[in-house]
Image (cartoon, rainbow, N blue to C red):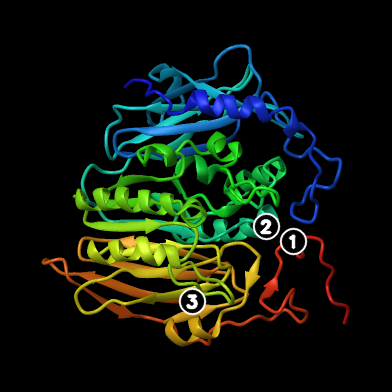
Amino acid sequence: MHLSPLTKVACAMALILTTSDTMSAVETQPANTSVPEGEMRYEVSAFPDRVALIATAAPAHSQTFSWRTRVMSEPALLQITAATPSPGLHLKATEYSAEHVRLTSANGKAQHHRVTVDGLTPDTLYAYRVSGDGTWSDWYQFRTPAATFSPYTALYFGDAQNAVYSHFSRTVRESLRTAPRAKVMLYAGDLVNSRDGIHDDEWGEWFAAVDWMAATVNQLPAAGNHEFSSDDDNPIRHLLPNWTAHYPVAGNGPDALSDTVYFSDVQGVRYIALDSTEALQDEAHAKRQAEWLQNVLADNPNRWTVVFHHHPIQSVSKGRDNPPLRKYWQPIYEQFDVDFVLQGHDHTYGRHSQLSDHSGPVYVVSVAGPKMYLVSDEAQRVMHRTAEDTQLFQTLAFSEQQVAYRSYTATGELYDAFVLHKRADGSKRLTDQVPDTAERRCQNPAPARDDRCWNGTDVIYAQPIKK
């Protein structure tokens, strides 16, 4: 095992150091978090927090670990060993020094540490801990994926974005009750709402919600538009340093986009993350990703393929549409017979496919947090199943011949289901298993707008209706 080099550390450092002074003056947004104005619930400290296990290109053999502490005089450390029932884990642990980037917010001056460890043994239970300033985290356990295909379950979430700790947390907790041995947690963007790039409390709530799950289950995030800056005077949005500080992803995408575009092979399934925000604001980025995607799909030895990105190929919500994605990406999905395209952004649920009896992807849009839009008439007409006003999570149970897809509400009820069968020649067949329940529609007695059921920022401090 050895320490892998970090990609773009110098660039990230330069960006963060030049923005750190301006990032210290933060106006709190209590309507979107549970943190009252003036409180420091997520203040950086000596104790390591925001620990994440991030999938590399080949997580059966390597893993990336990231975490946060206050600024330290010595390098932070990671200790890792094959897990045993004995408490003497430290006796055989291998120790690594972390590299870091610095980020300053209203919660203090932080170092975000990361280590990539190579040479791991497939299908092996490991234990690790990370250091703080004079202290250590608890020991976390994770199992590396098998080197070849073996059945397992992945979890997929749409946008969390608003009221993350207050409302998204119940969705992600219920998902682990449903699939306690899931190997992957996949996010289709807009983890937080932090468009100004400085609201660190939102990231604190994100990691409070995913908690130990993020440290023990491989994380596969896609960047959404809310992971980018928003400046009315500058129409070109830029990826915020918060993203790269928390999620140093596999880094095997196109050079200019490797912080957000990547692929990871997990136990016979290739997961491919694309950056739809960059694609929609710059046609050149859409083309560049399409070229890269073709190469990644042309050289793909895996049994199953999942592409995920933020903006949908076919929109579900009223008034939304993303033609460049259909122009540049959808033909490639069809050409290479991608199995699933998992998306977010629309704050509704919609599932459709153009699956014939032999090929084609299944497209899904979902939402995990409380911001809720309304389904368009067109989506109701063409999609197999839609929903409004419903927090959801999805399980994908992969086996050699089929994938059992299930969409559950945050309260654990089955909302949508199908089985995708794959024959020996690669052709596919879909068996619908939609439950015999009505499609859900907005139940808010005072909808936020004519195209929106809930803002997401209107739920934390909302008062009950007096009876």
| Left or right side of 35 for 64 | left
Q: Quadrant of residue 16?
A: top right
Q: Which mark is nearer the camera, 2 or 3?
A: 2
Q: Earlier in the sequence, mark 2 or mark 1?
A: 2
Considering depth in this image, is 145 or 108 the residue closer to the camera? 108
| Left or right side of 408 for 133 | right
Looking at the picture, does residue 435 appear above or below residue 118? below
Separation of residues labelled 2 and 3 (CA atoms)? 23 Å
Q: Residue at x 21, y 56 (%)?
A: 303
| Left or right side of 122 for 189 | right
Circle number at residue 415: 3
Provide the residue designation for mark 1: 457
Q: Position of residue 236 (x, y in %)?
A: 59, 48
Looking at the picture, does residue 330 appear above or below residue 103? below
Provide the residue designation for mark 2: 162
Residue 461 seen: yes
Q: Amino acid at mark 3?
A: Tyr
Looking at the picture, does residue 373 appear above or below residue 221? below
Considering depth in this image, is 89 or 283 the residue closer to the camera? 283
Q: Residue furthest top?
A: 73
